[in-house]
Amino acid sequence: MNWKLTFSSLVTVQTFARKTLTVLFWIILVLIGSSFYFENISDYFTGELSPRKAAEKWWLVVHFVGAGCTLFLGPLQFIPAFRNRFRTWHRIAGKFYIGGSIISALMVFYLLSNYPLPGSILSLGLLAIIWLFTTGAAFWFALRKDFKQHRNFMIRSYVCGLAFVFIRILPIINTYTGIFNFMKDEDMIFTIYEWICWVYPLMMTEFFLVWWPSIVVRRKAQISA
């Protein structure tokens, strides 16, 4: 009896710890994202813009508004407590998330027409295409009530949207580690940032969503055979 109570208590503690860590993860992510987001959009209201950004001001504003829907509504889509208790709000937030992501991704194609780093145009163009595809796929699977695939593609879509955050973290990492200092050309460094900010996170996402589960399933099949 005591063993059962101990085991039950351990499970309860583990469950509480997992939920607490999940909440802390989303809080930290939103705080970091909010810091970068409001720091970047403040210039568009103070008038302190470079000539290129001033010429593209309203395109960038639309891009940032759409990205804001992605950044701030995304976490609500992944928190089970919100998703299960407030299904109507979950669907409404999901529609705004999808709409914002699509609008923000479409703006990228126009903004790339005058982008100062030629080596980044292909990177950001591919990111926009993948962002559109994963967001559209998430919506398509939701309509067909395949919620497992819906969730997986929402994760991929959100990772694409978080490129906005990752690309601003990379220079901070380099400041403290000097990991990219072997490259002397500043334009080259920023071009590398434009690739790393979404390629590496998407590869890690695929590892956890597809590659590792496939290995686990294969191993279980071999053990049971």
Image: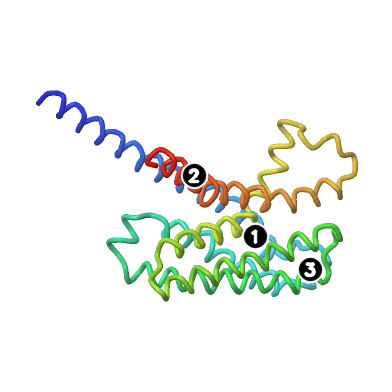
Which residue does the image show at 42% across and 44% down from the upper left? 221
Q: Depth check: 166 or 46 in front?
A: 166
Which residue does the image show at 64% across and 60% down from the upper left? 42
Q: CA distance from mark 3 to mark 2?
A: 31 Å
Residue 145 in picture, x, y percent from top left: 38, 71
Q: Residues within 10 Å of mark 2 (few under 14, many from 20)?
A: few
Give the quadrant of the N terminus: top left
Which amino acid type corresponds to the residue marked 1 in the rendered image?
Ser
Q: How many marks overall?
A: 3
**Is label 1 or label 3 in front?**
3
Q: CA distance from mark 2 to mark 1?
A: 21 Å
Residue 129 in picture, x, y percent from top left: 67, 68
For label 3, the residue is: 112
Q: Depth check: 222 or 163 in front?
A: 222
Q: Is residue 151 left or right of residue 193?
A: left
For label 1, the residue is: 42
In the picture, residue 112 is in which quadrant? Answer: bottom right
Residue 183 in picture, x, y percent from top left: 87, 39
Q: CA distance from mark 1 to mark 3?
A: 22 Å
For label 2, the residue is: 28
Pick whichever of labels 3 and 2 is earlier in the sequence: 2
Which residue does the image show at 73% across and 65% down from the upper left? 47
Which residue does the image show at 81% across and 62% down from the upper left? 50
Pick whichever of labels 1 and 3 is earlier in the sequence: 1
Residue 157 in picture, x, y percent from top left: 56, 61
